[in-house]
Image: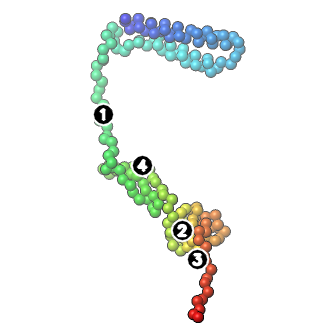
Amino acid sequence: MSPDEAAAAVLQTVKTLLAPLETRLAVLEAAGRPLETLAADLAGVRERLAAVEVKPLLAGPAGADGKDGAPGLDGKDGADGLGFDELALERRGDRGLVVVAKRADVTREIGAIAFPVPVYRGVYAPSFRYTPGDLVTWGGSLWHCDQATSARPETADGAAAWTLMVKRGRDGRDRREP
């Protein structure tokens, strides 16, 4: 079978398969139903059918026997993939790690991991910027930072940023010897 004969056979098969759809579309359009979606689909099918009519079925010069054509050009070699020795974990602050890929003098961050670990920062200092998870001592009590702040615990500014963890105990009585 020649390429032209094969193309004609495919075209006839497609037309035969589309005939019931076109008939049903005509019936539905005559009934006055909204068919914008179906009509758009049919238009797309018609465009593809027109492309089949224009394009030859088999690639290659006329009269080609269907065997493989000439080899294509060689492509450019790509870079090698990353190995395990080129991946590293680096510390980020007190609570995090960063996964990085390193090759020669190029470093790329792949992802970060943050751990919700409390970190004791000592006695509250107004010049320090506290982040969620920080713990401080103030007024004899232990406080947990809930949101980034420099505000002092037990103040109106710091009320939303700090949660009391351990409340200061009462002073004890002096011990007396019997």
For the N terminus, the image quarter is: top left
Say few, some or many: other residues with alpha carbon within 10 Å of mark 3 (under 14 / 14 to 19 / 20 or more).
few
User: Can see residue 129?
Assistant: no
Name, please, the residue furthest toward the right: 32
Residue tagged by mark 1? 76
Q: Residue at x 33, y 48 (%)?
A: 84
Q: Which mark is residue 110?
A: 4
- Disc 4 residue type? Ile
Chain-order first, disc 2 or disc 4: 4
- Asked whether, in this view, residue 65 is left or right of residue 44, the answer is left
Query: Residue 12, can we see it?
Result: yes
Give above or below for 55 relative to 172: above
- Looking at the rendered image, the disc whose residue lies closer to the viewer, 2 or 4, is 2
Say which element carries label 2: strand
Query: Amino acid under label 2?
Result: Leu
Inter-mark Cα distance, 2 to 4: 30 Å
Mark 4 neighbour density, 10 Å: few (under 14) some (14–19) many (20 or more): few
Q: Residues within 10 Å of mark 2 (few under 14, many from 20)?
A: many
* Residue at which label 3 appears: 140
Nearer to us in this view, 109 or 83: 83
What type is the residue that disc 1 sits on? Lys
- Dot 2 and dot 4 residues touching (CB under 8 Å): no
Mark 1 or 2 closer to N-term? Answer: 1
Instruction: Give how far across and how far down residue 175 sits, in percent.
Output: 58, 89
Q: Position of residue 42 (x, y in %)?
A: 58, 16
Outermost residue on the bottom side: it is 178
Q: Nearer the viewer, mark 1 or mark 4?
A: 4
Type of colouring: rainbow
The residue mark sitting in front, 4 or 3, is: 3
Seen at 49% across and 7% down, the residue is 12
Which secondary structure lies at badge 4? Answer: strand
